[in-house]
Amino acid sequence: MRALLRLSAGLIVWAVAFCAIYALHGIGCARGWPDQTILGLDLQRTMLAGVWMMFLATALAVAAWLSRSRAAPIDRIARATGWIGVAATIVTFLPILAIPVCR
Amino acid sequence: MKALTLHRELTAIWRTEPGWRGHLRSVNHSDIGKRFIVAAFVFFAIGGVLAMLIRAQLATPDSAFVGPEVYNQLFTMHGSIMMFLFAIPMFEGLTMYLLPKMLGSRDLAFPRLSALGWWCYLFGGTIIVAAMLAGVAPDAGWFLYPPLSGKTYTPGINSDVWLLGVTFVEISAMCAAIEIAVSILKLRAPGMRLDRMPIFAWYMLATAAMMIFGFPPLILGSILLEVERAFGWPFYSPELGGSPLLWQHLFWLFGHPEVYIIFLPAAGAVSTILPVMARTRLLGYGAIVAAVMALAFLSFGLWVHHMFTTGIPHMALGFFSAASALVAIPTAVQVFAWLGTLWSGRPRMKLPMLYLAGFFFVFVLGGLTGVMLAMVPFDAQAHDTAFVTAHLHYVLVGGFVFPMLAAAYYWLPHVTGRQRVMRVGEAAFWLIFVGFNMTFFLMHLTGLLGMPRRIDTYSAEMGWTWLNLLSSVGGFVQAFGFALFLIDVVLQIRLGRRHDRDPWGADTLEWAMATPPPAYNFASLPTVASREPLADAPDLALRLARGEGMLATARHGWRETLAVDMTSGAAEHVVVLPGNGWWPIATAAALGGFFLSMLAGLYWIAPLFLPVVAWLAWRWAWTNGRRGDVGAVDAGAGLMLPTSFEAARTTGWWGSVFALGASATLFGSLLFGYAFLWTVAPNWPPPALVTASAVVPLLAVAGAAAAGWAMRRGRPLAALGGQAAIVAALAVLLAGAPAPTTHAYAATSAAIAGYGIFHALVAALMLAFVAARTRAGFHSAARSGEARIVQLWSDHAAGAGAFAAILLVVPGWLA
């Protein structure tokens, strides 16, 4: 079971990030966060970007951890899925940088 | 001589009884798998006839062939049958038939569960088709969107047929998913490490996991919609705080992974057949496994791309659009690995390869239009037009039907032991291929010209006439192709000559046996050291038949196979599987009674079937286990292993882990619905909240703690008391809650409490069972597997019950 968890770890980080950021986006829009500012920045976008960076750091840490073990073929696959998790965490949330938040 | 003796002894243990008794009582995976395949094909034929009726209606403008009421039933039933009664059961059947043989096992992990799934599928599918014959088929589209599917706009039982029939069939899908996952992880040949598994097993492991986590949202959504229709709980009614969009979220949370749930088994067949046709090994095994894992996850992040035009904010759409485009990459990795395999081998254009060529052409085109539709601006233009219909048929027919036809021709010699008789299959291919592209390529154009989906007719001035007529002609050409395919299969079964074992020169274990296969698959189990066991030992089949592998014995009348360590594939224990029996069909019949009573609106009769189901489950489980310790048994190759009666982590334990994972997903989906309505739906906050003193949730928490503590000390009756406390606490909260018909808040709160109560009652039943079994002498220090399983269920019920109780009172405290 540990081998399967290692195989899934990077993608699990992406999945949790997806749920968290989508939920946060919905809550923020419902509560009017885009109309509030923090340090001159749109509160909603800043929150989303912060959470995104937190998950990206986690995904990177998981990928680095998975990359340490290269003994068995299954470890090489786990390393690949770890880096897929990083790539997915970057690409999926790029809209945070550019797209209108709640329109 | 030893081979013949072993064959006779094992056949006596594993055989299916002759006649109707065998049909009703068999639990053998080959029997069940073949039944699924045949029934799925029958449903495919029914769905195909409906498609022809649709095309007849649309062939000319202002058609009076059928009226809009009938037409609505035609397209709804076509989609529903193809998705729920053809595609899923077809790959389940193929997998049930093949998987144990590929893995080097004698059967699946839970043979009776397979049989239960089969009967639920047959009964549920029959209900749906019978409703169509009675003229009350579902007619709100295969996705059954409310409010159209609600009581106001569909007052008859049409939507109930869908909701209850499909949910009944989904029991079968959940059974299959758990069965497949546990079988792959535990019932493999010794030495078959994870990275030595046949590639098909990886695909099916991902598919099974996706089903376990993908189907519960649909099951939940269906339960909620049926409860709204039957009892007026307003989950989807905006005037009372509900939202039709909640249904769309729950439906597509299932619906998009569903596309990959259908595609992955077919891709698994492609990855298995293609290297054999190319006379080489699969290129990029590790890359394909990583791509399959990526698809299994990423496909859960796409569901909103079916809802791009529902008014969801652009940034959220952006997340789903990005994920939708991203998912093309792991798909492309597989396509390039397949092309590389062909390039590195010496392909032969046998019939399965011809169908694979058709798959490449059609599926890649479908993938490309998928990337187009993943882009929000394009989707906003093409949404709900025939372009989308064309795209989804390119993906599903290209990604599933063509590979399944290749699989049929590839594995039919295994099932029948016979060769093809004439070249009818080639003619069938060209009719299907040309007919399909003629039908659906043109529908891209009709869609781009603005023709909406699901309209029953159009006027000549729209300019769609010739395209529609040609699409209809193509549809009938395709139908002739499928009829020829059926004729070809019948000819092979009736007239085909016997062939040598392994006619394609494949290297996977399903060919290391006689064809058609004996009921026990392998007279002795192989030990494998690579991904191509037959390449390592071409005479493996004969050696296994002679009993030169593991478990080369027929003792005590036991149906034995081996369980292995998940990762290393080291032999762990000898699994003793149950034999044929009445329990699966009896349980399915009792469940059928429940669903039919609900369908008939006999809401006071329906609950009476639940104690019957509980009694049957009790008696079913009572047939397991032994009253005395067995100790280690000889597994062959000098290994003495414990039996499943005395193993610590049995297949049942793992099956329970997955079943509870599915249940937790359903609960999570319910919590998502609760949060979604609270955040997004109109007419919130609710007029009244659940009110209760802090003592009530504390009672639930104390009950949960007591249940957990008692189970760890081997006191199931004390744990039962803890579960009773949870039920009492949730019942008190329900009594103090506003009526569920008054607002979606009250309805979801009642649903959350209902989940907790239901699970606590199930856990209580299991705890009583364990106590009774201990008294009857079925348990000892060594035989503790059942108690461990029940502990899982009890812990889950305790955690969910306590959480539900706290969640229900928090809004009242915060207000």
Image: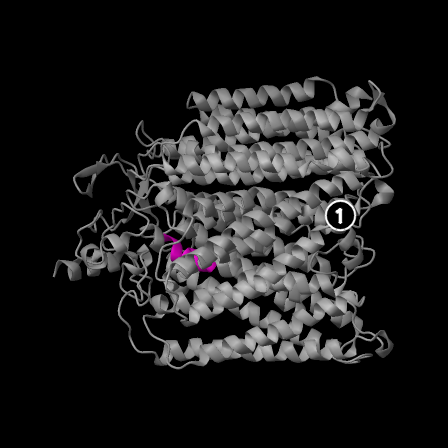
Magenta span main SS: helix
Q: Residues within 10 Å of mark 1 (few under 14, many from 20)?
A: many
Quadrant location, the N terminus of chain B: bottom left
Task: Check residue B94 for magenta coloring.
Answer: yes
Above or below, B274 against B423 in this view is: above
**Quick check: B200 left or right of B14?**
right
Element on which disc 1 rests = helix
- Residue at the outermost left position: B1
Decide if residue B269 is in sight here: yes
Can you give x and y, in whole percent of width and height, for residue B414 in the image? Answer: 34, 66
Q: Place residue B758 in its image quadrant.
A: top right
Task: Check residue B754 for magenta coloring.
Answer: no
Q: At 75% across and 37% down in the image, what residue appears?
A: B676
**Stretch of the chain drawn in magenta:** B93-100
- Residue at the outermost front position: B343
Decide if residue B600 is in sight here: no
Q: Place residue B152 in its image quadrant.
A: bottom right
Above or below, B76 against B462 in this view is: above
Quadrant location, the C terminus of chain B: top right
Can you give x and y, in whole percent of width and height, for residue B161 in the image? Answer: 67, 60
Q: Which amino acid is tagged 1?
A: Glu
Above or below, B452 against B723 in this view is: below
Q: At 85% across and 31% down in the image, what residue appears?
A: B685
Can you give x and y, in whole percent of width and height, for residue B476 in the image? Answer: 62, 79
**The disc numbered 1 marks a residue on which chain?**
B
Residue wearing tag 1: B228
